[in-house]
Image: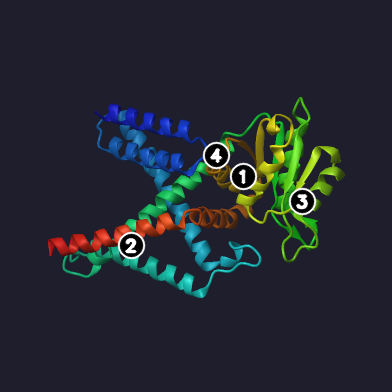
Amino acid sequence: MVLSTIVFLICLTALFTFWQPRGLTSAVVTTVSCALIIIVASFSKHLWAQVLAHVGWVLIALVGGLGIFTLLLILNAPHLVVRKQERLTYGLIAGVWLWVILAVGWVYGLNSGHFGTSFWPWLTFIPAFSTYLGILFAASLFGALRADWWRAKRADTLLVLGAGLQHGDQIGRVLGSRLDTALAFAQRQIKKPTIIVSGGQGPDETCPESTAMAAYLVAHGWDAKDIIEENQATNTLFNILYSQRLWSQLPDGGGKVIIVTSNYHLFRAEHLASELGLRIGGYPAHVRWSYLPGAWAREFLAIIMLHPRLHRGVLIGFLTANVLWLLLIS
């Protein structure tokens, strides 16, 4: 029974991965399936299942710890998370702190022995929705690791995503890493690929990102005739959408197209491409380890904001079910 359940969950994961190899849905299905496999294995008396369960719970603890660290980073050091020209309002931070306090209080109430006679059951929607967000966090983390592992090997067209300019027109470390990675990848190809550099001009920039990116590539030995600039996009979605109009005009519609961006950002870029109906690969540009915590926290917030209506609907659903259940049993 245990083995057959695990095999079924593995097959389900493989099916969704085949259907949507670079999307968020398949990452969520994989995450939930792995959690169910760990739970099922925990009830088995077989040695292999017990080992699997112990390893799984350790991984869950690590992901949970990383999630808590990310949450505390967002709450206590928002300046490390948000980009320039952006800010988290004090009202939003206070609201999240209140949510965290109530969630901790609910857990305390559950273990106090007086849970049923207290007001805590009316707040069960809080840990339920927190679990939902935890699943999304784990799925996003898995998706980021999957995008880093399943990197492209060949390309006819490379799309390099912008990351903002420093001091108006200077290439920073993150953007430089993306460009250097694209150059190294392009130079390994048998047939010389076309490189599309995508990025518009921000309010504190003196030129479009694409102009500075193209100049960087030329300065490092890449032919200007093999570079195409996309200078209108201001976010990842429009980076891909506007660039698709350019590569579709190339021979064979651009051939095999891959996205080159930072490792923490690649999963969301591939997911957005998948949402647009584009089956394109990716290649990660790595950043300093010290930069990753803040960058990943910002990236997870961006992933959450991909489907705000869905998350509001889930929250309202949990709240409604919570209230109706208590009214029915009272």
Real-space Cα separation, disc 2 to disc 3, in angstroms: 44 Å
The residue mark sitting in front, 1 or 4, is 4
In the rendered image, the residue lying farthest to the top is 190
Q: Position of residue 45 (x, y in %)?
A: 24, 32
Image vertical order of residue 199 relative to residue 108, above or below? above
The residue labelled by disc 1 is 263
Image vertical order of residue 182 relative to residue 320, above or below? above
Q: Give 149 or 253, whichever is nearer the viewer.
A: 253
The mark that comes first in sequence, 1 or 4, is 1
Horizontally, residue 312 falls left or right of residue 324, namely: right
Image vertical order of residue 180 relative to residue 130, above or below? above
Image vertical order of residue 198 relative to residue 278, above or below? below
Horizontally, residue 191 falls left or right of residue 132, namely: right
Q: Position of residue 296 (x, y in %)?
A: 56, 53
The mark that comes first in sequence, 3 or 1, is 3
Q: Which label sits on residue 182?
A: none
Viewport quadrant of the N terminus: top left
Q: Give 131 or 115, whichever is nearer the viewer.
A: 131
Q: Which label sits on residue 210?
A: 3
> Type of residue at label 2?
Ile
> Type of residue at label 1?
Asn
The mark that comes first in sequence, 3 or 4, is 3
Real-space Cα separation, disc 3 to disc 1, in angstroms: 20 Å
> Type of residue at label 4?
Gly
Q: Position of residue 110 (x, y in %)?
A: 24, 61
Q: Which label sits on residue 277?
A: 4
> Type of residue at label 3?
Ser
The residue mark sitting in front, 2 or 3, is 3
Real-space Cα separation, disc 2 to disc 1, in angstroms: 32 Å
